[in-house]
Image: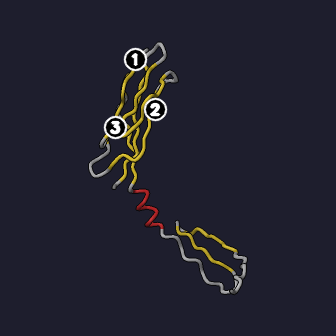
């Protein structure tokens, strides 16, 4: 069995007009292939984030907020946000094409609750 040589490779990355060029310097001085940005863009475009309408949660009350994924997409993650610090989140889950978040207002004044979802093309 032949042992592999360890090569020290120096990679220099130069950004020009939004494109990256990488050159490897070693025994063969062959250029390193450029990354395929289209694959990265396609992956990023397949995921979109959406925020639902605010729902008022009165003092001492429990409410659900929801947001729906656009047609042709499905929820793959989500959560919620609130306008105050007195909301205790109890639920956060997908149901069909909708993301639901539930919270109880443990404070003495009204706050708002919003659901947030990440939708993905299946």
* Residue corresponding to mark 3: 67
Does label 3 or label 2 sit earlier along the sequence?
3
Taking depth in this image into account, of 33 and 99 the one nearest to the observer is 99
> Which image quarter is the C terminus in?
bottom left
Crowd tier of the residue under label 1, counting other residues whose Cα lies within 10 Å: few below 14, some 14–19, many 20 or above: some
Q: Position of residue 23 (x, y in %)?
A: 63, 77
Crowd tier of the residue under label 2, counting other residues whose Cα lies within 10 Å: few below 14, some 14–19, many 20 or above: some
Does residue 16 sit above or below 26 in this rendering?
Answer: above
Q: Dot 3: what SS?
A: strand
Q: Residue at x 58, y 73 (%)?
A: 21
For the rendered model, the colour scheme is: secondary structure
* Residue corresponding to mark 1: 61
Taking depth in this image into account, of 4 and 40 the one nearest to the observer is 4
- Whether tag 3 and tag 1 are in contact, CB under 8 A, the answer is no
Q: Real-space Cα distance between discs 3 and 1?
A: 20 Å
Does label 3 or label 1 sit earlier along the sequence?
1
Does label 1 or label 2 sit earlier along the sequence?
1
Q: Position of residue 84 (x, y in %)?
A: 49, 24
Q: Position of residue 64 (x, y in %)?
A: 36, 28
Q: Position of residue 11 (x, y in %)?
A: 66, 73
Q: Going by the image, does 28 lie left or right of 115?
A: right
Q: Going by the image, does 91 lie left or right of 22?
A: left
Residue 49's label in the rendered image is none
Taking depth in this image into account, of 97 and 82 the one nearest to the observer is 97
Does residue 65 sit above or below 5 in this rendering?
Answer: above
* Residue corresponding to mark 2: 81
- Whether tag 3 and tag 2 are in contact, CB under 8 A, the answer is no
Q: Real-space Cα distance between discs 1 and 2?
A: 16 Å
Q: Quadrant of residue 93?
A: top left
């Amino acid at each position: 069995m032949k042992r592999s040589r360890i090569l020290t490779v120096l990679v220099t990355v130069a950004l020009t007009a939004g494109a990256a060029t990488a050159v490897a310097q070693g025994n063969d001085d062959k250029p390193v292939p450029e990354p395929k940005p289209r694959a990265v863009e396609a992956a990023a475009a397949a995921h979109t984030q959406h925020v639902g309408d605010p729902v008022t949660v009165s003092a001492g009350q429990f409410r659900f907020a929801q947001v729906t994924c656009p047609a042709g997409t499905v929820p793959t993650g989500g959560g919620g946000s609130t306008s105050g610090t007195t909301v205790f989140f109890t639920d956060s889950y997908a149901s069909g094409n909708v993301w639901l978040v539930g919270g109880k207002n443990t404070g003495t004044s009204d706050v708002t609750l919003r659901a947030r979802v990440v939708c993905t093309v299946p």
